[in-house]
Amino acid sequence: MIEIRGLAKSYGAHQALKDVTLSIRPGEFVVVLGPSGAGKSTLLRCINRLAQPTAGEIVVEGTPFRSSARDLRLLRRNVAMIFQQHNLVKRLSVLKNVLVGRMADLSPVLSCLQLFPEADVKIARHCLEQVAMSHKADSRADALSGGEQQRVGIARALAQQPKFMLADEPVASLDPKTSRIVLSYLKQSCKESNIAVLCNLHQIDYALEFGERIVGLSAGEVVYDGAPAGVSGDVIRRIYPGLDDPNVLDAAQRLTERRRAAAEAVIAAAAAEGRA
Ligand SMILES: Nc1ncnc2c1ncn2[C@@H]1O[C@H](COP(=O)(O)OP(=O)(O)OP(=O)(O)O)[C@@H](O)[C@H]1O
């Protein structure tokens, strides 16, 4: 369980986050939905301490974060991060990139020499299987497509064996078909490993399709926290002030139904290719 209590963050006079309170249960797939500038990235960055909150508390597994080096180490071990630009080491193989996720548990010497124990290699290979990328284990990371690189990014985060995964716009630079494949693997693999996910998205249809719970953020404030089924036109207008087309949500829901069927077919094909 991760609990965020009264979290606030200001940049000078600008309040990017205002009194955000959320509890995320193990294995839950939560989508943070909001327009550009709503504070989605700031929220994730405050949780993993890439940014220092101005106020509030974050409690991981019952232990409040206290800013000590030990707490920071524990936080980094328990909380993995997936970025929009996946940040793989281009010249390394896919497998070695995933093994980077094991480095926190490795002695500095072995880590420098890139000598990984067999048990870590086994974990990394399993994580590649979870995102159907085993067949590319020996390829260089820069020989992969954008969607494949993001699947390797997910495998690297899984290899860390975290309790929580923070994903900041993980599909922002991918086409719709690839976005769906990546989000499906993210959700499915985290479910298998009982990892809670907080995933920032700005696309309404993906949020409704993949989120088990939607947190709507607008101007730094939580304006909705609940099931996708409760996201009415009113809720959308609260999250996206100024957007007053009542048909937006209906359109998003229709798209969702159509695309879910298409996504299942594409994922089955990708998984079959992974096994081949
Ligand atoms: N390092 C910073 N210094 C000053 N202002 C910042 C900084 N980081 C973010 N902000 C401001 O805080 C607000 C929230 O930014 P944030 O990046 O969290 O929004 P977001 O919802 O993730 O947006 P996007 O979807 O465009 O990434 C914005 O107004 C942004 O300009």
Image (cartoon, rainbow, N blue to C red):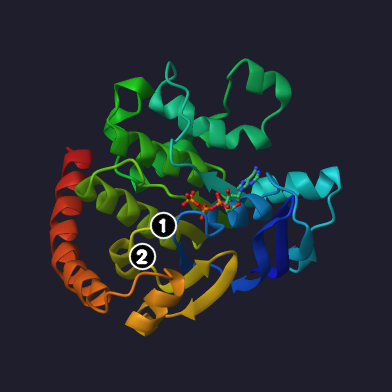
Q: Nearer the viewer, residue 117 or 214?
A: 214
Q: Which mark is residue 115?
A: none
How many tags in the picture?
2
Query: Do we see residue 202 in this rendering?
Result: yes
Secondary structure category for the residue under label 1: strand
* Mark 1 Cβ inside 8 Å of ligand 1: no
Disc 2 secondary structure class? helix
Q: Earlier in the sequence, mark 2 or mark 1?
A: 1
Q: Amino acid at mark 1?
A: Leu
Look at the numbered discs 2 and 1 and tell me whether their residues touch, using CB distance below 8 Å: yes
Cα–Cα gap, marks 2 and 1: 7 Å
Residue 168 falls left or right of residue 73: left
Residue found 39% across the figure and 69% down from its top: 242
Question: x, y percentage for residue 133?
Answer: 31, 37
Task: Report x, y in % for residue 130.
Answer: 36, 48
Q: From this viewpoint, is residue 232 visible?
A: no
Q: Which residue is mark 2?
A: 207
The answer to whether 162 appears left or right of 10 in the picture is left
**Could you say which quadrant of the image residue 62 lies in?**
bottom right
Instruction: Classify the position of the C terminus by image quarter.
Output: top left
- In percent of width and height, residue 270 lies at 19, 45
Along the line of sight, the residue nearer the viewer: 169 or 178: 169
Q: Residue drawn at (30%, 39%), measured in percent from left and top? A: 147
Measuring 46% from the left and 54% from the top, which residue is drawn there?
Answer: 36
- Picture quarter containing residue 119? top right
Residue type highlighted by circle 2: Ala
The residue identified by callout 1 is 201
Counting from the top left corner in percent of width and height, residue 200 is at: 46, 57
Name the residue: 18% across, 67% down.
255
Vertical arrangement, residue 205 with respect to residue 116, above or below: below
Q: Quadrant of the N terminus?
A: bottom right
Instruction: Sort mark 1 into few (<14), some (14-19) or many (20+) by Cα contacts within 10 Å.
Output: many
